[in-house]
Image: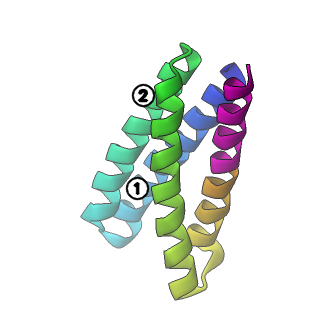
Amino acid sequence: MKMTASILAAYALAILIGGLMGYLKAGSHISLVSGIVFGSLLFLCSYAVAKGKHIAQYIALALTFLLDGFFTHRFAKTLHFLPSGLMSLLSLTVLIVIALKIRKTQKT
């Protein structure tokens, strides 16, 4: 549980920082708001996963899936690796970690 929660918290921090950077560099209010909203929700999920709440894993999976779709779409549109390509890969990695954790908890 703790490893998945730590990975999720690090991802949430990356989302928060990315939203802030989008606002500071491009003046994008949408980046700031979405970074705060998604980052906060992922931090809450991270805390709940650390406490052993299984529903938080599914919520984190859904949020990460949405973010991965967004970043992959942006990468396909711009073909710039930074930031959208990197965030797409990071999102995919977190998505796999959460999915494996869910699979492991379902087997026991």
Task: Give the amino acid at mark 2.
Answer: Leu
Q: Residues within 10 Å of mark 1 (few under 14, many from 20)?
A: many
- Residue at (50%, 66%) from the top-left corner? 69
- Residue at (57%, 43%) from the top-left corner? 11
Query: Is 107 part of what is drawn in magenta?
Result: yes
Where does label 2 land, which residue?
44
Question: As displayed, is residue 85 above or below residue 3?
Answer: below
State the image quarter where residue 31 is shown. Answer: bottom left
Residue at disc 2, secondary structure: helix
Residue 58 in the image, given as x and y percentages of width and height:
50, 37
Which of the two discs, 2 and 1, sits closer to the camera? Answer: 2
Residue at disc 1, secondary structure: helix
Magenta region, residue range: 94-108
Disc 2 from disc 1: Cα separation: 17 Å
Task: Give the amino acid at mark 1.
Answer: Gly
Question: As displayed, is residue 85 above or below residue 92?
Answer: below
Q: Quarter of the image for the C terminus: give it.
A: top right
Residue 66 in the image, given as x and y percentages of width and height:
45, 58
Contact between marks 2 and 1 (CB within 8 A): the answer is: no
Query: Is 62 part of what is drawn in magenta?
Result: no
38 to the left or right of 64: left
Question: As displayed, is residue 22 above or below residue 32?
Answer: below
Main SS of residues in magenta: helix
Labels 2 and 1: the sequence-earlier one = 1
Residue 72 in the image, given as x and y percentages of width and height:
56, 72
106 to the left or right of 75: right
Q: Quarter of the image for the N terminus: give it.
A: top right
Q: Residues within 10 Å of mark 2 (few under 14, many from 20)?
A: some
Q: How is the image coloured?
A: rainbow
Residue 26 in the image, given as x and y percentages of width and height:
36, 72
Where does label 1 land, which residue?
19
- Residue at (45%, 48%) from the top-left corner? 63
